């Protein structure tokens, strides 16, 4: 009513499910499904995974567990923290004698235990992913366990979730997920609900947000269908800056929005470092060490070739000998031409070793030349 009376100049609206027809299911319906699943898995330990921020879903899981006489433990830092805070704020109703630490439930009979865990999106180091790979220090899952993924993969996370499910199935775990059971109701409005919002708000300008580019495009089309002029709909990319002025909505340049990779205490890691690490991981490294005399007339020692991740040295001595010969020939030729500058010799070593390695093995490991003079 406020929107209709006062008018809305700009609407920014979630686009995640804009390409999904119809209406989303009610959150209330999930509680009944969870209760039925808990009853059907009597005698088995149940591990449930959901978003740690979805307090209402945590309450539904807790209600189903308590109704079956189970105690509850949380697993995963964000889940433990959110449950504790939600209880303190009165947003979550779980009796204290039913909420135990994970250490207290490991030795209880399986049918008395429910674990609420993080990892519903297959995050590699999440509690559920560690259980799926048998790397969790808290729980070891087997054929006596049931895992309920009370969520739906966010677009882009499908492969990670699939990997976790496969890992659980390999352990003999019974897995229930949104693909086979109604254990999740989306929090993102579908097309008909988005159209209803647009019809109520009737914005002058419309910017679809939150979702992949295809979702925002689909949402933009819904805006057009609901009467927003096509010229008044802006589909933006990460970093786009927009300004709402008296004259309307305009694109106002861009701001830097790159990925930030945190590496220990160093902080952000640059693209160059990441490229080096990728080469090291995929191709290995070849270190070539040569010592020349200070007059730049001859090789004193070397070349010595040290490899990691390129070839297995004990089984490739002949290949390494050839590499030494090729590098030595290149260095001697450079010295004979009077080019004894250490930086120039390093380039010769890198070029000759790199060419040999690529021609003989069709690999491109990182070549690290070390040239010294004595």
Image (cartoon, rainbow, N blue to C red):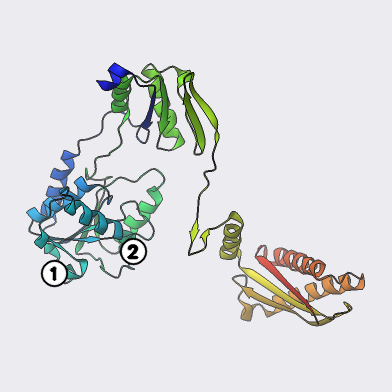
- In the rendered structure, the answer to whether residue 116 lies left or right of residue 333 reads left
Depth check: 264 or 44 in front?
264
Disc number placed over residue 92 in the picture, else none: none
Depth check: 132 or 225 in front?
225
Classify 10 Å Cα crowding around label 2: few (below 14), some (14-19), many (20 and above).
many
Answer whether residue 156 is visible to the viewer in this image. Answer: yes
Where 131 sits versus 85, above or below?
below
Name the secondary structure under disc 2: helix
- In the rendered structure, the answer to whether residue 160 lies left or right of residue 105 reads right
The residue to which callout 2 is attached is 130
Q: Nearer the N terminus, badge 1 or badge 2?
A: 1
Q: Residue at x 26, y 63 (%)?
A: 172
Q: Residue at x 16, y 68 (%)?
A: 105
Residue 191 image-quadrant placement? top left
Percent of width and height locating residue 174: 23, 57
Name the secondary structure under disc 1: loop
The residue to which callout 1 is attached is 108
Where 14 sits versus 135, above or below?
above
Percent of width and height locating residue 155: 39, 43
Depth check: 123 or 341 in front?
341
Residue 324 image-quadrant placement? bottom right
Quarter placement of the C terminus: bottom right
Answer whether residue 43 is visible to the viewer in this image. Answer: no
Residue 371 image-quadrant placement? bottom right
Where 194 sits versus 27, above or below?
above
Cα distance between the residues tagged 1 and 2:
21 Å
């Amino acid at each position: 009513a406020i929107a209709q009376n006062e008018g809305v100049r700009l609407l920014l609206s979630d686009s995640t499910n804009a390409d999904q027809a119809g209406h989303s299911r009610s959150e209330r319906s999930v509680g009944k499904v969870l209760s039925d699943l808990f009853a059907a898995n009597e005698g088995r330990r149940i591990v449930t995974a959901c978003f740690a921020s979805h307090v209402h879903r945590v309450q539904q899981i807790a209600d189903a567990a308590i109704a079956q006489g189970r105690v509850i433990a949380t697993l995963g830092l964000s889940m433990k923290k959110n449950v504790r805070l939600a209880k303190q704020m009165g947003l979550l109703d779980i009796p204290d004698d039913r909420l135990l630490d994970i250490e207290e439930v490991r030795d209880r009979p399986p049918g008395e235990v429910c674990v609420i865990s993080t990892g519903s999106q297959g995050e590699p180091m999440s509690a559920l992913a560690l259980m799926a790979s048998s790397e969790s220090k808290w729980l070891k899952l087997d054929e006596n366990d049931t895992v309920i993924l009370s969520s739906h993969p966010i677009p882009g996370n499908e492969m990670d979730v699939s990997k976790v499910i496969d890992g659980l199935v390999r352990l003999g775990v019974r897995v229930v997920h949104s693909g086979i059971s109604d254990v999740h109701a989306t929090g993102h409005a579908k097309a008909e609900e988005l159209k209803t919002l647009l019809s109520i708000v009737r914005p002058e300008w419309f910017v679809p947000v939150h979702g992949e580019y295809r979702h925002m495009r689909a949402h933009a089309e819904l805006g057009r269908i609901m009467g927003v002029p096509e010229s008044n709909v802006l589909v933006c990319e990460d970093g786009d800056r927009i300004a709402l002025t008296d004259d309307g909505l305009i694109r106002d340049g861009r701001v830097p929005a790159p990925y930030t990779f945190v590496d220990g205490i160093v902080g952000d890691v640059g693209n160059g470092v990441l490229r080096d690490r990728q080469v090291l991981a995929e191709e290995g490294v070849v270190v070539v060490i040569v010592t020349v005399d200070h007059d730049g007339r001859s090789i004193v020692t070397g070349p010595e070739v040290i490899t990691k991740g390129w070839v297995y040295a004990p089984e490739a001595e002949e290949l390494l000998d050839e590499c030494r010969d090729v590098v030595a020939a290149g260095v001697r030729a450079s010295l004979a031409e009077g080019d004894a500058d250490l930086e120039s010799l390093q380039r010769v070593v890198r070029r000759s070793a790199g060419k040999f390695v690529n021609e003989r093995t069709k690999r491109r490991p990182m070549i690290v030349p070390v040239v010294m003079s004595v």
